[in-house]
Image (spheres, rainbow, N blue to C red):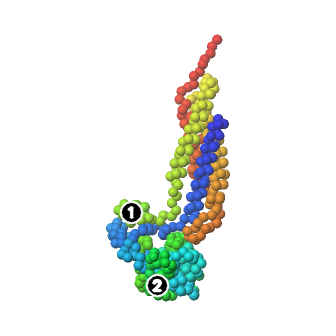
Amino acid sequence: SAPTVAAVMAGTALLATFAVAMASDTKFQARLYTPQTLAGEATAWVGSANMPVFEALVASTNPTWQVVTEQGIGVDYSGPNPDASEPFLTLVPAGCSIAQTLPTFTASEPAEANPCYVAGSLGGNTNRSSVTSLPAAEIIRRLELTGDQARAIREGAVLVGDPGWASKGEVTLAYGERAVLTGEQVASGASEAPVLWSKTTSYPALPIPADAYGTGGVNSYVGILVPQESVTAMKVSTTTQRVHLYDPAGPISTDAEERFNDRASEDMRITVERGFQRSDRLIMLIVFAIAGFLLTTVTLISTALALAEQQADMGTLAAVGATKATRRRFAGAQAATVALVGVCLGTLIGLVAGVAIAYPSTAHGWSEALQKEVILTPTVGIPVVHLLTIVIGVPLLAGLIAAASIRRAPHVTRRGN
């Protein structure tokens, strides 16, 4: 039985190593997971032109759902002559001109080298540098603002991702429209497009709550969140970036999501935020099922060969009064012992190897919530249920099958004088 124990041990060690490494990676990904919106709510990527159809579909299928559009500063590039000009909204740091806060059309100077190019609808030199807008009431709801903060948002205050951008509780924003350079103009050396019209206004500013990025209240790339009422007053062009849907009665159910998507076209399907979803569950199930089958088969083959060699012993046992039940227990114990020793030793070896793999691979990663590379304590996941299924299930199954295979009494040779 030694070769069989070694084979079972090797197979189990590989299986346990794979299981621990995959469970650790899954746990690590869950640790860094950032929701795309609030839990139980839905998002959809619907263009401005399709919004009337989308809203009609929501009203006909789920009339209690609330539809909120998230608008960005920009133009609908599917419209006529989209490249003639582009709107902008940009943060203006102290001592900077509007032109300095806008990106050029050439790459002669890195964005990081320009201290005035911080955040705006045309980009910035920080990870959280984009601009988006929501209705004031939606901002208050999503961020759970109360008291003076809620009142400030209703009165036109903006939210910024970096408190350092707001000097004395205010932030200066420039908005307007600039021309778009043609390829010939860029080729001839032009880099800065002329600003067609602009206006600079100071707004009360509040910092975006740090936990808002981690709960899906605000997307991780957003640096400036402006109430849509203020954007409307600016008279700059906007386009739909995302659509948010929520049910005041509670989280959107899986059935409701599926019913809606069954009726929606591909460009109007919704996704409900349900937290981190483990994607390797099916893979783990298939791998463990195949491994369990192979380990049980190897154990049974070894047991069959051993019992074949022990036919004389079985005959002796029968001659001295051993019943079929006794011989079944004998066979079951043979299979269960071989399998148990092999899977236990293999599991111990696999645990050590799996942890050794998990440590370096889960010690650092990119955090969407923090928008930077983070160094973390290693994440180790032990799939206890899966491993116990092998440790207990394989010996038990092998023993039962081996015992059930004892059907007939062994051949006994009677000798006389």
Q: Number of labelled discs?
A: 2
Q: Amino acid at mark 2?
A: Val
Report the residue that reaches farthest toward the top: 417
Residue 183 vs residue 61: left or right?
right
Discs 1/2, front: 2
Q: Position of residue 271 (x, y in %)?
A: 44, 64
Residue 248, quarter of the rendered image: bottom left
Report the residue that reaches farthest toward the front: 188
Kindly tell me whether residue 148 is visible in this rendering: no
Q: Which residue is mark 2?
A: 195
**Of marks 1 and 2, which one's residue comes earlier in the chain?**
2
Q: Which residue is mark 1?
A: 266
Q: Position of residue 309 (x, y in %)?
A: 62, 28
Kindly tell me whether residue 196 is visible in this rendering: yes
Of residue 248 and residue 163, the one placed in the foreground of this image is: 163
Q: Amino acid at mark 1?
A: Glu
Task: Name the residue: 61% across, 24% down.
Answer: 315
* Quadrant location of the N terminus in the rendered image: top right
User: Is the residue 357 above or below the residue 295 in the image?
Assistant: below
The CA distance from mark 1 to mark 2 is: 39 Å
Of residue 155 and residue 123, the one placed in the foreground of this image is: 123
Give the numbered dot on residue 34.
Answer: none
Task: Name the residue: 59% across, 70% down.
Answer: 372
